[in-house]
Image: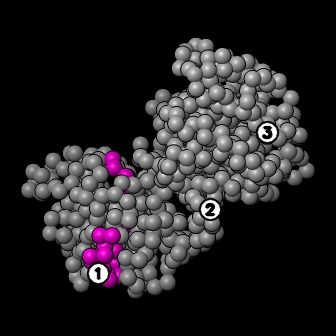
């Protein structure tokens, strides 16, 4: 979840480190720090809290080193504090490092080092790594790093500097993202692409169990046991402007309004002559599968719940959508006749990545749905389909979710098409109209701002829906929780009478979604039960449904029921956004959350 930056070049390191950490704030963090090499000595500055705290503290220092590393930390071992902040150094401050991930055997290693006379300043697992480097260092930092990597267990992205070898940075990766950029007169590294864009678009993607030595004018890549390898330099298509707010108050609002464009981009070239075109999946014989899994976390899981229903209805193959952290430990039934689809915006989600590897071990065919080019999940899967959402900076996912829905619906119909099933051509035709429909809904933003005022003083809200609508309300409740801190629960509407209705009282707010014609009337009937108990209802539905006693009803455009899952996301996102604004919340950086969850 943390952010890493590193610089080795002709210029000053600090400007790159700080701008990069600023671009990585969306990942979530509770402290920040930098280390630069200044006239043969390490200079480390770090502190608890926001990056602004570090910027203020740096005013007292003149850091002009040409080699440096930076970090924003999200606490896993040890409370947020100055001592637990990264970078971490050995006792004589000759070696310093930053680390993302978790060292699973750190307690055992720490006990061994303490027995050898080592003293620890922090409660973190990361400090174990730098103390091990100190223990193994014998005149060659690269050799010491190789020995350390053989000792530690778990996940890591490491950037290491030392006064002993002041003109280089050693980096290593396993199960945690790290990208290296070739800049003008420098090599740079970071956890994610936005941190590099101001300096370069030319990058190397470091794979698991690989290392690199960065110097100002050259770079060498190695396996974890020291064998030199070659890596391909890739030019990425993002630009810096895409990572800016472009006049919007927040990244979240900007990304909500980008959805017509990114949905159009995701659809581009995918539909021709009433057929779905997914050339990336050529070579798959879908007749061989008797079971399909969708595996994801959070918002991507909600998209998967929708996609799984559409795929099962379209193909009649049994489909299961499951949370990645549960899939890993549930002893799932997987073999060569299993198709496993893994959905992740970042492509670096730790639980999803581990689930992917489990599926591959059992010979399943794996497909990744990802947004980030070259991400670990997209590289490890047998096949990959990319959404075209572009960089998503706000922690709460919006445009990534709707583009995932679009791509998963395309995938469902593509598989049905390949199996010779009857395909709903009306839905395929209407897919191309979705961007305009989304644009129309966005034009009604003031209405959703009015709805949000109903939640201004409340601490709880209730969402209900059925079928595809249940997947939608799960996502709607999550969005409200994430950005406004309103406790929001989502229920299958038919389950209200089985307990949850006891929570409804005078003034409660119920957000209901009823877009599926065969069950909409049932949901609307459930609404009446909440109104009878004093609830105030916001209903999102379609024209033609008979609605009584509901003052706040929003009618979605007339599209096929399957596509309503995409459209209904927009009102629910706007409702969450405006509620957060009314309550004075930091919309882009919700407390305790991180954009890319790269630890369990």
Residue picked out by circle 1: 62
Question: Relative to residue 388, is residue 60 drawn left or right?
Answer: left
Q: How far apart are the alpha carbons under marks 3 and 1?
A: 58 Å
Q: Earlier in the sequence, mark 3 or mark 1?
A: 1
Question: Relative to residue 494, is residue 23 drawn left or right?
Answer: left
Q: How far apart are the alpha carbons under marks 2 and 1?
A: 35 Å
> Label 2 neighbourhood size at 10 Å, few (<14), some (14-19), many (20+)?
few
Q: Quadrant of residue 258?
A: bottom right
Question: Badges 3 and 1: C-beta atoms under 8 Å apart?
Answer: no
Answer whether residue 10 is magenta in the image. Answer: no
Answer whether residue 58 is magenta in the image. Answer: yes
Q: How far apart are the alpha carbons under marks 3 and 2?
A: 25 Å
Examine the rendering and report whether any part of residue 512 can be seen: yes
Q: Secondary structure at mark 1?
A: loop
Q: Position of residue 68 (x, y in %)?
A: 34, 74
Magenta-drawn segment: 56-76
Question: Relative to residue 448, is residue 15 drawn left or right?
Answer: left
Residue picked out by circle 2: 248
Between 508 and 519, the one nearer to me in the picture = 508
Q: Which mark is residue 556?
A: 3
Residue under the point 54% across and 16% down: 502
Q: Earlier in the sequence, mark 3 or mark 2?
A: 2
Frontmost of labels 3 and 1 is: 3
Q: Position of residue 156 (x, y in %)?
A: 37, 55
Q: Position of residue 82 (x, y in %)?
A: 25, 58
Residue under the point 53% across and 65% down: 193
Between 414 and 536, the one nearer to me in the picture = 536
Q: Quadrant of residue 521?
A: top right
Above or below residue 529? Residue 277 is below
């Amino acid at each position: 979840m943390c952010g890493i930056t590193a610089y080795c070049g002709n210029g000053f390191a600090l400007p790159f480190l700080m701008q990069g950490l600023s671009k990585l704030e969306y990942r979530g963090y509770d402290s920040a720090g930098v280390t630069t090499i200044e006239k043969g000595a390490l200079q480390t500055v770090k502190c608890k809290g926001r990056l602004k705290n570090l910027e203020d503290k740096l005013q007292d220092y003149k850091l002009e080193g040409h080699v440096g590393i930076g970090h924003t930390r999200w606490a896993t071992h040890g409370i947020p504090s100055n001592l637990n902040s990264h970078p971490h150094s050995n006792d004589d401050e000759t070696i310093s490092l930053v680390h993302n991930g978790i060292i699973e055997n750190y307690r055992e290693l720490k006990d061994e080092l303490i027995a050898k006379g080592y003293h620890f300043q922090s409660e973190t697992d990361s400090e174990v790594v730098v103390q091990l480097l100190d223990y193994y260092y014998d005149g060659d930092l690269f050799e010491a790093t190789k020995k350390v990597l053989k000792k530690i267990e778990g996940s890591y992205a490491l950037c290491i500097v030392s006064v002993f070898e002041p003109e280089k940075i050693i980096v290593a990766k396993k199960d945690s993202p790290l990208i290296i950029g070739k800049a003008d007169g420098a090599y740079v590294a970071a956890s994610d692409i936005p941190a590099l864009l101001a300096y370069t678009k030319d990058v190397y993607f470091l794979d698991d169990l690989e290392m690199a030595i960065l110097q100002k004018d050259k770079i060498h890549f190695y396996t974890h046991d020291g064998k030199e390898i070659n890596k391909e330099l890739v030019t990425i298509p993002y630009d810096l402007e895409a990572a800016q707010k472009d006049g919007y108050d927040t990244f979240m609002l900007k990304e909500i309004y980008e959805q017509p464009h990114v949905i159009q981009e995701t659809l581009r070239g995918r539909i021709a002559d009433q057929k779905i075109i997914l050339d990336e999946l050529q070579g798959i014989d879908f007749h061989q599968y008797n079971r399909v899994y969708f595996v994801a976390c959070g918002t991507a899981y909600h998209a998967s719940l929708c996609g799984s229903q559409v795929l099962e209805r379209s193909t009649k193959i049994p489909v299961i959508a499951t949370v990645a952290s549960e899939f890993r430990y549930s002893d799932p039934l997987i073999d060569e006749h299993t198709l496993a689809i893994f959905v992740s915006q970042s492509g670096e989600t730790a639980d999803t990545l581990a689930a992917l590897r489990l599926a591959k071990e059992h010979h399943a065919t794996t497909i990744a749905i990802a947004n980030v080019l070259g991400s670990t999940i997209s590289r490890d899967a047998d096949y990959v389909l990319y959404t075209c959402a572009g960089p998503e900076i706000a922690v709460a996912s919006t445009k990534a979710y709707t583009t995932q829905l679009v791509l998963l619906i395309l995938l469902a119909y593509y598989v049905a098409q390949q199996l010779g099933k009857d395909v709903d051509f009306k839905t395929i035709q209407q897919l191309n109209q979705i961007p305009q429909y989304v644009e129309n809904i966005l034009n009604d933003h003031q209405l959703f701002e009015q709805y949000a005022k109903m939640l201004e003083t409340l601490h709880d809200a209730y969402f209900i829906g059925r079928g595809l609508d249940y997947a939608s309300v799960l996502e709607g409740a999550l969005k409200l929780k994430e950005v406004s801190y309103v406790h929001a629960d989502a229920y299958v509407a038919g389950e209200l009478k089985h307990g949850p209705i006891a929570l409804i009282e005078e003034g409660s707010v119920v957000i209901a979604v009823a877009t599926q014609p065969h069950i909409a009337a049932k949901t609307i009937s459930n609404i009446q039960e909440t109104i009878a108990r004093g609830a105030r209802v916001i209903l999102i539905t379609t024209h033609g449904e008979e609605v009584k006693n509901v003052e706040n009803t929003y009618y979605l455009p007339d599209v096929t029921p399957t596509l309503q899952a995409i459209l209904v996301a927009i009102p629910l996102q706007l409702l969450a956004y405006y509620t957060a604004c009314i309550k004075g919340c930091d919309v882009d950086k919700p407390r305790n959350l991180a954009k890319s969850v790269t630890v369990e």
